[in-house]
Structures are given as C-alpha cells and as structure tokens.
Image (cartoon, helix red, strand yellow):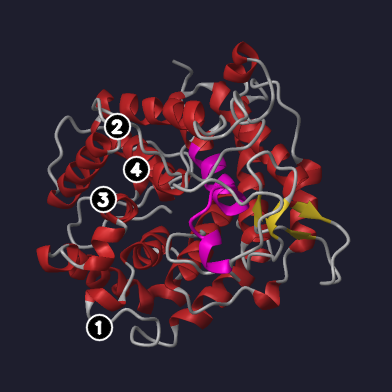
Amino acid sequence: MPSGADDVFGGNAPDAGTGCYRQRVHGEHLPKESVVPDPRVQEAVDLLDRFADRTGVTSSRPPRRYLWTDAFAVMTDLGLYERTGDDRFRSRALALIDQVHRLLGRHRDDDSREGWLSGLDDDEGALHPTRGGLRIGKERPERGRREPFDAREEWDRDGQYFHYLTRWMLTLDRAARTTGDARYALWSRELCETAVDAFARRDTPYGRPSLVWKMSIDLSRPLVASTGQHDALDGHVTARQLESTRREFGDDSNAPALTSVVETLRSMIDVYALATTDPLGIGGLLLNLAHLDQIDPEDTLNADLLASARAGLVIGPRRLGLTGAAETRLAFREFGLSIGLAAVEDRFPALADFVTLREPIESFWRTAEAQDSRTWREHEDIDAVMLAASLAPQGVVALPTPSARH
C-alpha cells in the first residue's frame, strides 16, 4: 500500500504512568475536573494551544488545515472538555470543525472551480458541508487530467483520501456524542455515504470489491487506483459506530441507515491480509479493535483484529523502527501505535505484554532534542497533535453515550 511520510491511516484506556485516569467503558461519563492536575494532560493542552495558534484556529494567522491532523485535534479537545469541564476545549473543537468544513469542504483558492465540493449553493452547502467529501489539505493542487502520474509528486498533491474521510467521520460522530447535537451525526453519515459511493469499485482484479486509495477533489476520477490495506476495515468499523450512534440518538438526525454500506465494506475485508509491521498501521488495528469491541464484543472480526495486531507487535521495537536517532524515525507514525495501545490497555490480556511500548515512544519524542530534529520539524503539526492525543487519549479512544442535546 502507499506509504508516504505525510500520508497516514488509521481508544479507551487509563493514562499509563500517572494513575489519574481510570478505564472508561461504553456509556460511562467520567466526573469533570475544573483543573488539569495531570502534567501529561497539561502538556497535551499546551501542545494543542500552540497548534491552534499557529494554524489559525485561535489566532489571526492564515488558516492552515490538514484533515487527518485536524481530526485528532478535535477529538483530543473534546476529550479534554469531558475530562475538565472547561468549555474552551469544546468551543475550540467545534470552531475547528467549522473551519475544516468551510475550507476543505470547498474548492481551493487556486482552483478555477468555486464553492462547495458537492455543487450545492452556499446556503444548502452550509447545511450539508460533507456531502461532497473533504479535501486532504495538501499544499499543491491535484494532478490535472492530462498530467502524467508521478508517484513522488503525488504525495504532495491535493485530492481526497478514503482513510482521512473515515477519520473525519469518527470526529463528527465524537462531536455528536459529546455535544448531543444530531447535526454532527447527520454530517458524518452523509460523508460516509458519499465516500463509499465514490471510492468503491465492484469490478476489480482482486476478485472482490475494493476501495480506491485516492480520488480527485470532485470525486470524479481516481488519482491513485490501488487499494489501501486497512481502508475497508476502517470504513466498516466506522460505519458500525455511526449506526450505533444513530440508534442511540433515536434517529433524531433524519439520515438514512448505513446497513448496506456496512455490508459492502465488510465484503471487502480480507482478514488474512490485515497484519502489518507499520507502527501506525498496528495502531489503527488496535483502535478498530477497541471501537468494535465496544460496539459489538461478540463480532468474530474482533479475534481477527487482535491476532493481526499481535502478529505485528511480536517482532519487537527494533524491527518496528522504534529505536535509533530521531532523524531516522517519524513521530506521528509511532504515536499512532501509542494511541492504539492506550485504546486496548487493561482490556485484552493477549496484548498486555505490548502496552509497555507506549511509554518509551512518548518519552523519546517529548524531549527537546527529539523535537529539534529535522523529521519532527518537517511534520510539526501532525507530530504535536498526535503526541497530545497520546498523552490525553480519551477523546480518541472512548465511545461515550450521546449527551443530552445542548
């Protein structure tokens, strides 16, 4: 599968190292705290404060949006709101959602096309901002229809990624559950329907339906036709979660069910091809395992996910690339693993021996020396946000019961 440095793919656990967190199970609401007593959580707050300032969320700087990074920022802020009761985290998360929709849900400033990607007029598009999908947020415009394909250049070009869209679906679902506002659930399900309809290919050489890796901004043509290793899995588990939310809301969002989407994506999953040695990929398996286990602990897919994640973890830190100098490592990919480990901590005995990998990952990248490295500085936004999510994982890993509507 494609594996560019900037292109990532995809929990509920106590915070290792402090004892201040306790397990949060489905449906449980933790007591709110008016202060942030945990230094790890305070570090996460500081990281997100600086990110929001330099990318134009809370400052007058020009907005700089990137869908994957923004998804983790929103979810972490929502978790901090639940943890502390401080409404500034909730307000910032919702402001970032709005900014993402207004920027990544519309055509680029350097594009001859204008308006919402969906083609809806301004007012209707604002009511359904995800119906046309969401751009990745790359600096360079997408490859033109007559431009030759260049694999190296493609990493820097805009478009739409299915795995980024699933991450944003989860973000909107999290916002719906935290705020009780069914609009976010509606937008999440509309995005899910749009993405599966655009990315799915039924006639493929693989012998089963599959998903295109990257589509054009307007979803009219594939830009990279190969299939991501975990895209169908991400989509299936995400759609299952969205359906769970719909039932818990009592279908208050007036959006259609995703039953056929769930079945379509399940048919695309090859459970014998899920294992990976990529830390971020393993973390994605762990997050999917944690979420699916909360939704349906009897699903047989849980066992496949656990076995696939364990197959990658057993090779050890060195072969996973978790040792060596910062210049030879990518922090955000390692944080994907540490967040996934937070999701399964104290929940799956078969993974207990591997949870200890989380602490050395975080400790290494929390040092000034590591954060002064070229690889950190080149990916500062995504590195900082995913470190914050690892230090305060509640917003990413937990699946709370929807709150009363505000």
* Towards the viewer: 34 or 66: 66
- At 61% from the left and 64% from the top, the residue drawn is 230
Query: Label 2 to label 3, Cα distance in Å?
Result: 31 Å
Residue mark closest to the camera, 1 vs 4: 1
The stretch of residues the image draws in magenta is 151-171
Who comes first in sequence, dot 4 or dot 3? 3
Q: In which quarter of the image is residue 182?
A: top right
Query: Label 4 to label 2, Cα distance in Å?
Result: 18 Å
Q: What residue would you read off at disc 3?
A: 21
Residue mark closest to the camera, 2 vs 3: 2
358 lies left or right of 131: left
User: Main SS of the magenta segment?
Assistant: helix
- At 36% from the left and 81% from the top, the residue drawn is 321
Instruction: State whether residue 75 is above or below residue 268.
Output: above
Q: What residue would you read off at disc 1?
A: 324
In this view, the residue farthest toward the top is: 123
- At 34% from the left and 87% from the top, the residue drawn is 318
Residue mark closest to the camera, 3 vs 1: 1
* Towards the viewer: 336 or 111: 111
Who comes first in sequence, dot 2 or dot 3? 3
Q: Residue 76 carries which label?
A: 4
Q: What residue would you read off at disc 2?
A: 56
